[in-house]
Amino acid sequence: MFTLAYPSYIPFMTYSENRDLRKTMYMANATKSCKNDALDNQKNVLRIVELRYQRANLLGYKNHAHFVLEEQMAKTPEKVKTFLNDLLHKAKPFAVKEMNELTKFAQSLGFEGELQAWDTAFYREKLKQKLFDLDDEKLKPYFKLENVVNGVFQVAGKLYGLKFKEITNIDKYHPEVTTYEVTDQNNQLVSLFYADFHPREGKRNGAWMTSFNDQYIKDGKNNRPHIVNVCNFTKPTETKPSLLTFSEVTTLFHEFGHALHGMLANTVYPSLSGTSVYRDFVELPSQVLENWCYEEEALKLFAKHYQTNEVIPIELIEKIKASANFMEATNIVRQLNFGILDMAWHTTNPTEITSVFEFENTATKETQLTPVVENTCVSTAFSHIFQGGYSSGYYSYKWAEVLDADAFYYFKEQGIFNQEVADKFKNNVLSKGGSEHPMDLYIKFRGKEPDSNALLKRAGLLEERG
């Protein structure tokens, strides 16, 4: 049985050869809660945006977006819209080109007509395999979990002078959790670190960072934090260690980036410590650390075959880097679609909206790369903005990507382990938490505001100019 849960839906749409069944699955997913039945959400969507608009007005704001963004890095809806539209203007021509190339590839395999929304994931995967001949089974032997953990510790050591020592004399909530004492170059305690990396019954799926004790200063004493990383990587067996996919490697680095934000905190108040920052800033430390996974200088530290100890071949590194940008413009436009739709819902006077379908289609017209399918709708199942905490904040995914691309561009210019740049990032970003406005912190680190072109350069969509 296949369901609309992502671990079921995404592989089906990516690998199923049966086009009719792909369409069936797509239509089921794209018509969630908009069939004019008892589970329809159209009236709920309109009521939610109406109440948010009224609340904002009562509090003296023009609309919900103005209310929310006052305490975000972007500050205003106008700045967010300019940011999203600027990226769309730059990325869309490349996205259109990518879709045309994908169509030609599909036609070379016998496909006729125009690619529909239920075709793209399927043909993308086939084209990716043809271009890069790169799959997880070729890479996993080079990413033994213990080696990757040691590698991220080495990266943190080279950048921030941290040392990690496994200890067994503190309490932990499960026997599978590994505990570490983290110290600095002067052997002073920085943090305790708990690593919980394998699935078990009763444990939530996914990956995240949290803390048992935040850093703060009281009565002259700097209370150091207890930081946790939780992941769900395949358990080792009697004959084979836990081997990670490359995606899992980047996940480990991502969550460890959050962990560094917590470990290196140095503020007075626990409410402003570590990751207690604006939502559109919190992903910078995590996303920027992922960049080291693609760099030969860092990979050579830990990407070694678990049987032969052979360092990962340079040709595999090059394939990893090349495949990272595969159809990246299309990916960017897809994310911009959601951000633009979110801002449309929360900057428009709800009394002017009569149809959820028409409003959504008008708002996202410029981001459509495949034909619009009648009677489908994103808004009625857009839980991030109507149920979760991302209303007027979905842009922050791309915003954080720009921050991390721009920040890592600075590292690349000076050297990915450059001590001066690392110290600036540590002292102006990682240690400050939410004690200052994030844009002020970023400018202190970088010397200027982030440049959205850095994201396009990393994606291979903008040529370097010397």
Image (cartoon, rainbow, N blue to C red):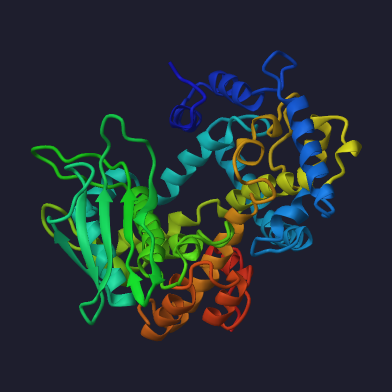
437 lies left or right of 162: right
Please tell me which residue lies in front, 221 or 164: 221
Q: Position of residue 82 (x, y in %)?
A: 76, 62
Q: Is residue 429 shown above or below 2? A: below
Q: Position of residue 369 (x, y in %)?
A: 69, 43
Please tell me which residue lies in front, 219 or 359: 219
438 lies left or right of 214: right
Q: Residue at x 44, y 49 (%)?
A: 131
Let me know if residue 380 appears in the view. yes
Q: Position of residue 139 (x, y in %)?
A: 28, 50
Which quadrant is the N terminus positioned in?
A: top left
Please tell me which residue lies in front, 167 or 240: 167
Q: Residue at x 53, y 71 (%)?
A: 435
Which quadrant is the C terminus positioned in?
A: bottom right
**Quick one: which residue is furthest to the right in this view?**
352
Q: Is residue 459 shown above or below 443? A: above
387 lies left or right of 236: right
Let me know if residue 144 appears in the view. no
